[in-house]
């Protein structure tokens, strides 16, 4: 997989050569290095031009939006225009996701407890399964207060669930994962 490293620059001459060289000196070599200079006036363009034989793209003048840059790169590499209105091809969807991913909300979507409110808001609270408790520590879990059949899940991972079909016959010593004391 090829990686694109994009570095915007505006009047960073004192640190620019060191920054460029730190990127170029990485052991991973399969990447393109794109430097976007936003009309610097401090000598940054001259430093970039002097080092330009080590990377592929240098755009002087004004910076472009992420969408414009991605559309241009896509057209050049794939040979067709991106469809952001109705992305159907996997490549179109991945580029759209790159532009529209809601990073600040990602933890909410991935956390099994926090996503419950999101589901209730978007679909309705009736679709959520019953919640018996939320605990800060496994030591807080009172097994006697749980029903005969239940599932224990941690919110920050997967594959650590305990499915208890019958609380009376469940062997906590051998079947409980390491996060149960």
Image (spheres, grey):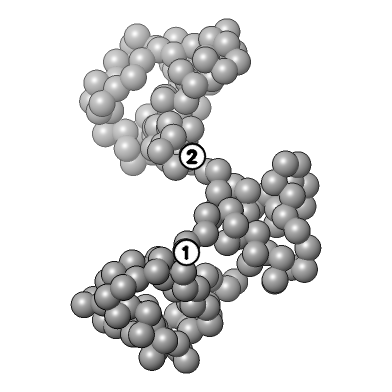
49 versus 143 height, above or below: below
- The answer to whether any part of residue 152 appears in the image is no
The reply to whether discs 1 and 2 touch (Cβ–Cβ < 8 Å) is no
> Which one is closest to the eye, mark 1 or mark 2?
1
Question: Of the numbered discs in the image, which one, if any, rests on residue 7?
Answer: none
99 versus 109 height, above or below: below
Looking at the image, which residue is at 75% across and 58% down? 81
- Residue 109 placement (x, y as % from top left): 48, 32
- Number of numbered discs present? 2
| Quadrant in the rendering for residue 39 | bottom left
Helix, strand or loop at mark 2: loop
Q: Nearer the viewer, residue 44 or 32?
A: 44
- How far apart are the two marked residues, 1 and 2, measured between alpha carbons? 26 Å
Q: Earlier in the sequence, mark 1 or mark 2?
A: 1
Helix, strand or loop at mark 1: loop
Number of other residues with Cα within 10 Å of mark 1, as a class: few under 14, some 14 to 19, many 20 or more:
few
Looking at the image, which residue is at 47% across and 91% down? 53
Taking 72 as reference, is 135 left or right? left
Q: What residue does disc 1 label?
A: 62
The quarter of the image holding the N terminus is bottom right
What is the residue that sits farthest to the front in this orientation? 41
Q: What residue does disc 2 label?
A: 102
């Amino acid at each position: 997989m090829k990686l694109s490293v994009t570095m915007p620059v505006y009047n960073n001459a004192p640190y620019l050569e060191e920054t460029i060289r730190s990127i170029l000196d990485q052991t991973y070599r399969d990447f393109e290095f794109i430097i976007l200079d936003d009309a610097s006036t401090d000598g940054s363009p001259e430093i970039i031009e002097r080092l330009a034989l080590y990377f592929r793209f240098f755009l002087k003048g004004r910076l472009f939006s992420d969408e414009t840059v991605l559309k241009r790169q896509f057209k050049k590499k794939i040979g067709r225009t991106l469809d952001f209105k109705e992305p159907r091809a996997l490549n179109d969807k991945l580029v759209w996701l790159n532009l529209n991913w809601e990073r600040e909300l990602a933890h909410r979507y991935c956390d099994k407890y926090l996503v419950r409110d999101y589901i209730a808001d978007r679909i309705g609270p009736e679709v959520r399964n019953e919640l018996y408790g939320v605990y800060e520590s496994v030591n807080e879990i009172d097994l006697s207060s749980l029903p005969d059949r239940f599932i224990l899940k941690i919110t920050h991972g997967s594959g650590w669930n305990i499915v208890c079909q019958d609380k009376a016959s469940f062997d906590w010593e051998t079947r409980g994962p390491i996060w149960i004391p």
